[in-house]
Image: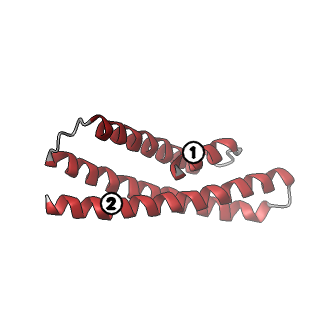
Amino acid sequence: VFGGLVWILVASSKVPLPIVQGWVMFVSVFCFVMSTALLCLYICGAHGGSSSWVALDAICQVTAALFYLSAAVLEAYFTYSIRLFSGNPLILTIYRENIAAVVFAFLATLMYVIHKVYSLLRWKSS
């Protein structure tokens, strides 16, 4: 959910620095699709109780946590850098949208880290 909000907020703002925001968009879309696909596979019962699925889940959560951490830090840096030009009303709107994107990116990172810890504990016990 938080990743989807990051995706929407970054997509709705104007993109003055495409390389940074492109990475944030890639991470949010990739992790959103990956998490949704894994959820659907688990709901359908495709895993069949196999321990390799536990390892796959752990690997996906570790990757998503690292990706989101990098994206959240880049988005925070970008937001901090456009703060200096916040006199313009258009820049101020972009700044506010990016602040919300930073908050949700760090919340998504936190959720992926928590899920990563539980996935690694489950993987260790299997």
Q: State the CA–CA distance, disc 1 to disc 2.
A: 21 Å
| Of marks 1 and 2, the one in the foreground | 2
Mark sitting earlier along the chain (1/2): 1
Q: Position of residue 92 (x, y in %)?
A: 80, 56
Identified at 85% across, 61% down, the residue is 87
Residue under circle 1? 7
Answer above or below: position of 11 versus 86: above
Q: Position of residue 24 (x, y in %)?
A: 53, 49
Q: Give, as a three-letter code, the residue at label 2.
A: Lys
59 on left or right of 100: left
Q: Are marks 1 and 2 in contact (CB under 8 Å)?
A: no
- Quadrant including the C terminus: bottom left
* Front residue (pair 45, 31): 45
Identified at 71% across, 44% down, the residue is 14
Q: Which mark is residue 116?
A: 2
76 on left or right of 108: right
Quadrant in the picture for residue 30 = top left
Answer above or below: position of 50 versus 116: above
Q: Tell me the SS state at disc 1.
A: helix
